[in-house]
Amino acid sequence: MAGAFAAVEWGLTSFRAWLMEADGTVISQRQASESLAAVKSEGFSETLESNLAALSVPHDVPVVICGMAGAKQGWQEVPPVMLPMRLDSLPRHAMRVDGLARDVRILPALAQRGADPDFMRGEETLLFGLFAGQPQVSARICIPGRFSRWVGLQGGDVTRIATHMTGEMFSVLQRASVLTPILRGAEGLDETAFLNAVERAFRSPGRYLNAAHAIRARNLLEGIPPERAEAELFGLLVGMELSGGLRAFDGDGPVWLIASGRLCEFYEHAFQRLGQSCMVHDAEAAAREGLAAAAVQLFDLSGMLNGKRGRMSGA
């Protein structure tokens, strides 16, 4: 089966691609480590074609891409769309890559000006995958990661973004701080210590710096193991994020948590510890669904999709 399109999520250090049918069925998939720095020397087009060849994607099959490929330091800059923005309009702002025989489109980032300037690149596609076709949807969303994004949707409009550098700060303190020697050798996270720290930081976010140094003091005085020290540090950061996020994006309903793997589990348990309900959706699935929904519009696949539905109903 040739497939109707290829979908690519291309980040700073990762590359995921799927060959898909018009209805979003995955024919084949591939994951690779294609950092932007390495790709710049090898060539974006060459890197893309090499990965597509590994998926047996024909040369006439179009490609839709989200992520850092559209950044200034990426393949071809796609201007961000300013908020507020109708979520359903996202594909209309995609840009075709110049000078290629293959039809390759890159989806835009979203940005906000004003007193709280912010932007996100890649996460907009996850939202499109979850909420496209729901013109009046309202929701508050948390997308954890190196940069955790909190997003507000009101009546189908993306109205607000708030980025928390939770993962980035954890990495910096883990690798290059006075806490680094204490954290070395951790083979996992003590979940009880993590959740206790989440609640402590949520209740008193202003004491975060003091609480972080207390990890060092407890190591000196009590000899706490690396697993507990690392869990406490991560819990303090997540607790601060949830304190800011839940207060800024106030509401009565559940928070949509879009995440995968162990990170998803930690955030889900953190929300539960704080008495906040959440609805979980896998981040990889959301990205794939968003790229597929965008491809249907970008490459006018509705006729192909309707034709397949007709054959299925007549079978």
Image (cartoon, rainbow, N blue to C red):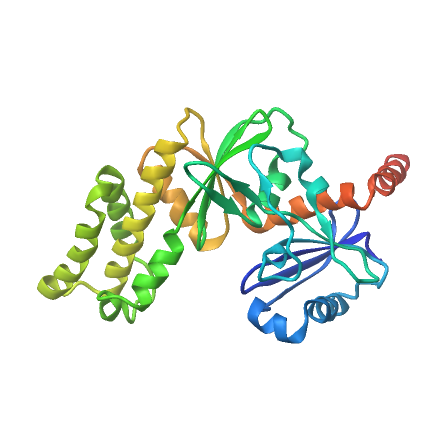
Identify the residue shown where x is 54% and y is 65%.
13
Residue 35 in view of the camera: no
Picture coordinates of residue 236, whole percent (x, y) = 27, 49
Where 164 falls versus 19 (above or below)? Answer: above
- Residue at the extreme front: 114
Picture coordinates of residue 209, whole percent (x, y) = 21, 51
Locate the C terminus and report the quarter of the image it occupies: top right
Question: Quarter-wise, where is residue 58 in the image?
Answer: bottom right
Say whether residue 104 is left or right of residue 85.
Answer: right
Question: Quarter-wise, where is residue 297 in the image?
Answer: top right
Say whether residue 305 is left or right of residue 77.
Answer: right
Identify the residue shown where x is 61% and y is 45%.
125
Identify the residue shown where x is 26% and y is 68%.
180
Residue 94 in view of the camera: yes
Locate the N terminus and report the quarter of the image it occupies: bottom right
Picture coordinates of residue 261, whole percent (x, y) = 48, 54
Identify the residue shown where x is 63% and y is 41%.
129
Residue 77 or 229: which is nearer the viewer?
77
Residue 209 or 116: which is nearer the viewer?
116
- Residue at the extreme bottom: 41
Residue 98 or 282: which is nearer the viewer?
98
Question: Quarter-wise, where is residue 49 in the image?
Answer: bottom right
Picture coordinates of residue 198, whole percent (x, y) = 28, 45
Say whether residue 110 is left or right of residue 239.
Answer: right
